[in-house]
Amino acid sequence: MTDLTSLTLAEARKGLAQKSFTSLELTDAHLSAIEAARVLNAFVLETPEQARAMARAADGKIASGEGGPLAGIPLGIKDLFATRGVRTTACSKILGNFVPTYESTVTSQLWRDGAVMLGKLNNDEFAMGSSNETSCFGPVGNPWRREGSNATLVPGGSSGGSASAVAALLCMGATATDTGGSIRQPAAFTATVGIKPTYGRCSRWGIVAFASSLDQAGPIARSVRDAAMLLRSMAGHDPKDTTSVDIAVPDYEAAIGRSVKGMKIGIPREYRLDGMPAEIEKLWSEGAAWLEAAGAELVEVSLPHTKYALPAYYIVAPAEASSNLARYDGVRYGLREQGRNIIEMYENTRAEGFGAEVKRRVMIGTYVLSAGYYDAYYLRAQKVRTLIKKDFEDCFAKGVNAILTPATPSAAFGIGEKGGADPVEMYLNDIFTVTVNMAGLPGIAVPAGKDAQGLPLGLQLIGRPFDEETLFSLGEVIEEAAGRFTPVRWW
Ligand code: GLN
């Protein structure tokens, strides 16, 4: 029998249905893989007992023909999703040993459909970061290394644990969240598939909030098909989140293999950056050629406000974060540091509980929202956001079905290599992804090739609102042409 951990989710579903193996066997295989890969630090909490109990229950349901669409499939859950009775920390010291008494809507839908939880995955503290280095549990290792080097690279962030675990075959898929690129950038750094759906597609209820007008949940998976299967379970209207949208969730899997003939693919002029590595440039042209060969038509488009996206994002996101994070004050949950009075208790708790990057964001956010600066920064950034959204709308109004861009400006980098002295160096990673959050659009990252050092690179497809299906159809064309990439095991 082939190693059960190397199956795709779609293959595992078939094997379970044909009774080639049980969910308990599949789950145990992944639990052993997790144990053997602790050096990657992808999981911050393993839940083997819960996993086995869920697997047994799934096996029972499969046997009686009542298995849901994800029956018996072992998954990892980003530690930003509240899981009932299971510690949830957002990888921040300030949440301490917080154990929610409720389950996030997204995860409850996965369990409804029969999935099995293997444990909680590492991420940047409160999802703020692009390398998973801000986690209070320490950095995550990327299963990919440069050819001929033993240096550990970052898996990207903030969903670094999710991407690393999926790429290292520790779970068949994972939940993730994306506020400015946190699903797509780590997917690109690890040769996995990640989709950030349209804002409103997935409920945000029970997910630790970073920037509420930008946050969206989505899956990281081993293939485009697997991502489609996962998103179908994760998505859907939820009365508990007023920003979730009440429109039917299509069978995303049915979009795979659908013809892309005649589709118009926009290539945005402004994404051709000065100093962009030649390899990224080459990957982008290759991707365009693959889509063209499949019958799509390439058109040059302009998104003129692109250059303002990153600065505007780094005003809007910290502003919302500073407000969302005001609730961590030592009163209701998590860490409490004593003080002589309540103000001092707040101060001590927040000083002790938040990491450096989170503090930076809270300070930026408070500043841009403060009287006297609000108009100059926050209001202006919101206006820029409207213009960015309009750029995309103009493009789609001209009949463009989707836009093709690189997912990241480079391949994975080394731990400690970026952002030490200058945080902007790290923020630049999000250059191709933040526009999509600012406009609320769906975006998928698909592995498309490797750089000269053997590291994976990804392409991004941006779609019309609520048209994730087109992204799956086009994404699969790229996947078919590029092939699949697996890291050489060193852990
Ligand atoms: N890297 C971006 C940031 O640090 C995006 C993070 C995310 O999408 N959660 O804000």
Image: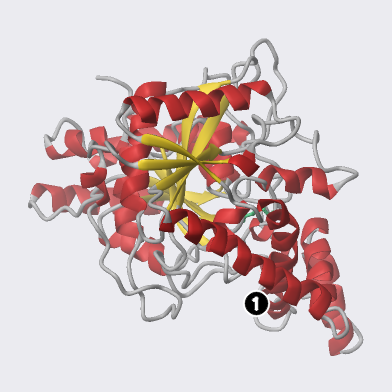
Q: Residues within 10 Å of mark 1 (few under 14, many from 20)?
A: some
Q: Left or right of 488: which side holds 92?
A: right
Q: Residue at x 53, y 29 (%)?
A: 284
Seen from this angle, which residue lies furthest front? 398
Q: Is residue 215 visible?
A: no
Quadrant including the N terminus: top left
Q: Position of residue 54 (x, y in %)?
A: 30, 53
Q: Residue at x 82, y 67 (%)?
A: 364
For the residue with label 1, is its CB less than 8 Å from the closest atom of ligand 1?
no
**Position of the C terminus by quadrant:** top right
Above/below status of 42 relative to 129: above
> Which residue is painted at 62% across and 54% down in the image?
434
Is 59 or 379 nearer to us in this picture? Answer: 379
Residue furthest top as drawn:
148
Q: Which residue is mark 1?
A: 333
User: Left or right of 384: which side holds 16?
Assistant: left
- Ligand 1: give its quadrant: bottom right
Q: Report the side of 314 relative to 260 (left or right).
A: right
**Residue 453 horizontal/vertical position (percent):** 65, 16
Q: Residue 262 placed where, x, y %?
A: 29, 39
260 and 251: which one is in front?
260
Residue closest to the far left: 64
- Residue 430, relative to residue 289: is it above or below? below
Callout 1 amino acid: Tyr
Reply above or below: 275 against 322.
Answer: above
Nearer-the-camera pick, 6 or 154: 154
Give the SS element for disc 1. loop
